[in-house]
Structures are given as C-alpha cells and as structure tokens.
Amino acid sequence: MRKANITQAFVGLFLAQCVLAWPLWAQDIDTRVAHSLEFARQQLANAVAEIGDSTRFPHDTHEDGSWRTETSSSWTSGFFPGGLWHLYEQTGANRWKKWAESWTAAMEKEKNDSTSHDVGFKIFTSFGNGYRLTKNQKYRDLMMQAAKSLATRFNPTVGCIRSWNNRTFPVIIDNMMSLEILFWAAKNGGDSTWHEMAVSHAVKTMENHVRADGSTYHIVDFNPATGEAIRKETRQGYADTSTWARGQAWGLYGFAMTYRETRDQRFLETAQKLADYFISHLPADHVPYWDFAAPNIPNEEKDASAAAIAASGLLELSQLATASEAQAKYRNAALNILASLSSPAYLAEGTNSSGILLHAVGNRPSGSEVDVSLIYADYYFIEALLRYLKLKTSVAAHENQQRFVPASIQLFQNYPNPFWSEATSPAFGGGNPATTISYHLPDFTNVSLNVYDLTGRLVRKLREGFQERGEHKVIFNGEGLSSGTYVILLQAGEVRKTRMMTLIR
C-alpha cells in the first residue's frame, strides 16, 4: 500500500512538472497554429515599419536579419501584400486591410507584364486575395488584364505557357502555380480559351515534367515549332535528374489546384503521385533538404519554403482526395510539417530575422539566398495555417465536434516488469523480452510517447507525430537501458497519461 502511495505521488509530481515545463514542440497543433499566427502578425507588422515604403517589397533577409527589398517587378512582390491580406482575413482588423491596400496598389503596373509567367504569381497573390476579401471591382478588372498578359505567352504548338525568355521554349514546374489566375479569369467573365490554355499546360507538364516514380524535372525545354521536348534540366536543383524540393512542392500544389478547377481525374492522380513522393522522401523532422538527392545529406541545408508550400498544397489535397486513407495521409503529413515549422527549430522567434520562418533556400547551386528567411516561405506558411483552421472548422461542423483532441486516452502495458518473466528470460529458454504499449485515440491528434528516468531525463523517444483515430501499438524492448524504474509518458493533444515500469536485467 505504501509503495502504491509513493508511486501515485511520484506520477502526480512528474505530471505537474511536465505541465509547467512542456515545450512548444510537445503542445497540440491548435496551440502551435495560434502561436505561429500571433508571431506572424508581430513580424509582418514590424516589417511594415521596417520597410516603410510601399513601393519596396521584401524578398530575403540579409545577414543581420533585415529584409532585402525589391521593386514590384520582382517575381516575389505579391507575397508581402498577400500575407497582409491573409492577416486581414484572419483578424478583421482595419490596419491589415490598410497596409494590404497600400502595397497592393503599388503593384498595379504589373498587370501588363508579359515578359514571364511570373505575372500570375505577382497578381493572384496580391490582387487576387484582395478581390476575394473585398470584391473591389478595380481588383477584378486588373486581374483580367493580368490573365490576358499571361495568355500571350501560350504557344498552341507546344501547348504550354513559356516561363522564361532564355533557352528555346523553357517551361518550369513552378509555372503550374500561374495557372490559377487563368482558371479564375475564365470563369469570372474572361476569355473562355484561357481555361483551355491552363488545362493544356497542365497536361503537357504532367506528360513531360513528371517522372514515373512521381518525382519531377525542374525545366523542360521545347521546340516551339514542333512542340517536341528537346531538353530536361535544372537551374535550382542539384542535378538534371534529381528532384528539387521546392519544384516538387510547386508541382503537388499546382496539380491539386488544377484538379479543384477542372475535376479532371488525371490531375488528382498526378497531385497524389507527387505528394506521395514528397512525403516518402522527407527526413525525420518533415522538412525537406533543398534537393531530395543533395549529395551530402544530412549535412545539407533544409528548405522551409518547400515545406510551407507543400503543407498548404497537402491540406487542399486532403479535401480533394476521394479515398479516406489518402485524405488522412495528406492531412497527417501537412500537420506534421506545420508542427515542425512551428517549432523553435524553424520559427524565427527569438532570432534577429525579420521573417517568420528560418532555414529557407532560394538557389543553392548559385549560392543565392541560402539558409535565410524568404517572403514566399512566410506567405505559404500563413496560408497553410489558415487552411488548417478552415479545415478544422469544416470537420468540426461535419462531425459536431470542436477539437481534434480526444476526450480520454488509455495506456496499457505489462506491469510492473515488462522485460522479465520466466517466459521471456533467456535463462528459462525465452528470448527478446519486450512490452507492448498500446493506446486508443478517439480522434486524429498529435501524439508524443516517451520514456523518462526518475530524474525526469528523457531516455527514449518512442513515437512523435500526428496519428489517426483507432488503436496504436508500440513494441519496446528496453534496449540500452539499465535496470531501474522508468516512467512512460503519453501525450495526445492536451491529454497526458503516465505509467511506471521496472526494468530488471
């Protein structure tokens, strides 16, 4: 009886310490999302003050952490006003609208840019978000002109929109993102052929950029007279045959969006193919290296921009996929990425960076924008956070629940000593002593299952990440631990459960 009382007291003390000192990384996804959005508001408000001039647009950070700015002609100019519009959407506060209107207005001349596919990036992230939230007729008209400018780059023989004006007729995987403005314009009173151009471009990209295993080429160069693909290469990846991480993210996001606009099954299958490759090649922290085949992994730079873009695309894909297993897989992957990006390892909180996310890579082969904050990483991170909130709300409404966090969890294990018995001891002819730790999740949530010694020191991580509802099991054999008493701590969302076990060698 006395031993039981001591055990209960220790567990209570242990749990109390965990509640007080539990780090951001171990908190549930709702807490992380709320914290990240609060930090995003702080950083973007500071950036408005830091930049001060609405004709200058943040691109990447200097060594001192301040923003390097460019003019509206930069391909990234739309992301800062786009982020301001996102925060106006999230808060409803007039200051965000005022700032967004100011930086958006400074981009008006870009509606006539027909020199590259980037007019889609620039205008849809800025004026597109502005029109969606305000229905300002001027924004609508301006987007129509931008779509018209983009359409001038379409070659019917190739069946694609030309990306750049170098090479012969280059088409980059990034160009999938520019199709959205054509889809939007065609269904909102613009030229109906713009829709067909976008579909043609997506089909050609699917046929020429996507490899059999779901990886992608960065650039495909075409003969404009014949439509033949004459060269497949990269400019920002490691090698022509490797897979540039951000390019893969552009592709999965772009094909998911194209399926949403067309409901053409080919595009859903392609989006899932690219997503499956991306997910299966992620490292343990769910943030990719800048190229999936970079030669010195794990001693290579991560790319938070690729992670943020992919997270946003995966959340949309989770709602478009028809199979429940696929829906869960893509939602799970997206939330694991968001959880990692919201951790101290990637969130710029407490650093000198003016950005939201650390550790993004622009162009590694050229040594440009390596391990910095990038404005488009921040934009898609905010977008992904807001998509999560919308997804959570829709699921809650559908299932008549308010949270993914389960009401209760039970942890079962052999007690008191799961590692020794006559049946398992080698002395009695047994072998491989182990215990099965099982628990039931009533709903999808973030799970952390760890083993601690009696001083509270973490000695083994058994499980970390988001998991679907249902029964889960972990086999633990105590390898590497000496005899003694240990605590297994399970956290799922806001629920914590502990069990003590004794290990005898």
Image: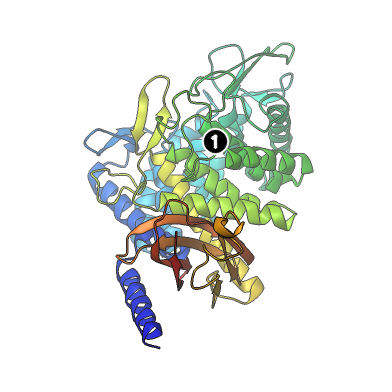
Task: State the residue in front, 214 or 297.
Answer: 297
Task: State the residue in front, 215 or 165.
Answer: 215
Instruction: Decide if residue 15 is in sight here.
Output: yes
The residue depicted at 63 percent of the width and 42 percent of the height is 275
Q: Which quarter of the rendered picture does the C terminus lie within?
A: bottom left
The residue depicted at 63 percent of the width and 45 percent of the height is 184
- Disc 1 residue type (three-letter): Gly
Give the farthest residue toward the bottom: 1
Q: Residues within 10 Å of mark 1 (few under 14, many from 20)?
A: many
- Kindly indicate the quadrant of the structure image that contains residue 369: top left
Looking at the rendered structure, the secondary structure element under dot 1 is helix
- Percent x, y of residue 111: 50, 35
Q: Which residue is mark 1?
A: 120
Horizontal side of 362 relative to 215 (left or right) equals: left
Horizontal side of 274 relative to 121 (left or right) equals: right
The residue depicted at 67 percent of the width and 55 percent of the height is 327
- Percent x, y of residue 360: 39, 37
